[in-house]
Amino acid sequence: MKRRKTIGFILLLMGLVIFVGLPSPWSGIAKADTAVPAAGGSENGGTGPEKREEKLARFEQAAEALYRSMQEGHTQKALEDMERLTDTLTGLSFKGLTTVEGIHALAESVMDAQHTLVRAEISPEDWTYVSAKLRLAVNSLIHRDKALWLQYYKVMREELDKIESGRISGSRTAVREAFLALKRHYDVIRPAAVIRREAWEISRFDSWMSHLEGLSEEGAPKGDALGRALKQGDRYLKELFGKTEDPVFLPVTGYGKPIYWSLLIGGWIVLALAYTGLRKYRADQTVMAAHAPKDREDGYRF
C-alpha cells in the first residue's frame, strides 16, 4: 500500500509540473517558469531562495544515498531512500534550473528507479543502471558546469575509437559490441544531458545514434558509410560535451606577451630596412665614382 501511495504521489507531482502554468512538453526549449506548488507557500516552498537551496541540497543527498543503496543491493534501505527523495520534491521550484524537456527527463529517471525497486524480481544490473542514471540527472540539475556526466566523454570517445578499429579491420562483431557499449553509456547520461543541453542537440545526437545502430547491424563494416558516420559523430560528441577544437596555428602574439613579440618583429623590420638602405647608398656612391667627369682645360665641368 505504501508503494502504491509513493507511485501515485510521483505521478501527481509530475502532472503538476507539466500542467500548472508550464508550456507544452513539445514547445521546444521553453524554460520551466512555474514550480510545483506547495500548500499555502510560494514557488520556493514559502521561505524564499535560501529555502530552495536547502531543498536542492537535500534532494541531491537523497539521490546519492539512493544510488549507494541500489548499487550495494540494500532493498529496504533503497525503498526508504526513494521515499525520502520523493518527499524532497514537495514544493521544490525548478524555475531557471532546466527546460521543460529537462524536467520530463528527471521525472522519467525517478519513475524508472521507482519501478525497478518495486519489481518482484531484483536485477542487480538494472539497479546499477537506473540508480546511476538518476544520480547523474540530479547532479546535472544542481551543478551546471562541473556535472558528473561530463566525465563520460572519455569513455564514449574510446568506444567510438573501438568502432573505428573494428571498421578498419572488417570485424562486424567488434563494431557491434563497441556500439552497444556506446549506447549503454549514452542511455545512462542522456537524462543529465537533456537537463543541460538544447532540445535540438539531443535530437540530433539521438538521430545519429539511430543511424549508427543501423550501420552496426549490417554486414561486414566496409565502405565509406560507417566512416562518414563516425566522423560526423566525433563532432556531435564534442559539441554534446562542450568540447572545442584546438587551434591549428598558434597566434603570432606568442604565449601571453604581445608587446615582446611586437617589439621583436618591429626590430627585425627596422634592421632589414636599414640594411637595405645602406646597400643602396653604397651602390650609389660606387656608380657616381665610376662616372665622374674629367676636368676640362677651361676649368669647367659638365
Image (spheres, grey):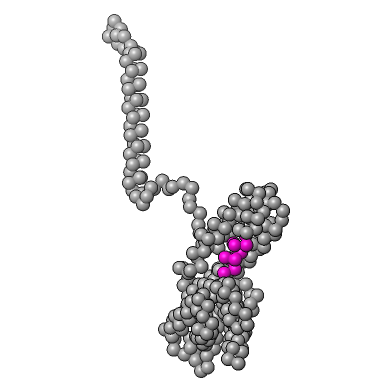
Q: Is residue 79 visible?
A: yes
Q: Is residue 285 left or right of residue 160?
A: left
Residue 201, by quadrant, is: bottom right
Quadrant where the image shows the C terminus = top left
Residue 301, by quadrant, is: top left
Q: Main secondary structure of the magenta part?
A: helix
Which residue reaches farthest right? Answer: 219
Q: Is residue 199 left or right of residue 260?
A: right
- Residue drawn at 61 percent across, 64 percent down: 183
Whole-percent x, y for residue 265 in the image:
36, 41
- Residue drawn at 29 percent across, 5 percent down: 297
The answer to which of 60 and 82 lies nearer the viewer is 82
Residue 203, by quadrant, is: bottom right
Give the answer, above or below, for where 192 lies relative to 235: below
Q: Is residue 9 visible?
A: no
Quadrant where the image shows the N terminus = bottom right
Please report the bounds of the magenta region as a residue range. Answer: 179-188
- Residue drawn at 65 percent across, 58 percent down: 176
The answer to which of 24 and 119 lies nearer the viewer is 119
- Residue drawn at 43 percent across, 85 percent down: 51
Which residue reaches farthest top? Answer: 297
Give the answer, above or below, for where 17 lies relative to 98: below
Whole-percent x, y for residue 215 in the image:
69, 56
The answer to which of 165 and 231 lies nearer the viewer is 165
Does 17 appear in magenta? no
Whole-percent x, y for residue 66 in the image:
50, 79
Give the answer, above or below, for where 298 lies relative to 42: above
Give the answer, above or below, for where 158 lies relative to 290: below
Which residue reaches farthest left? Answer: 299
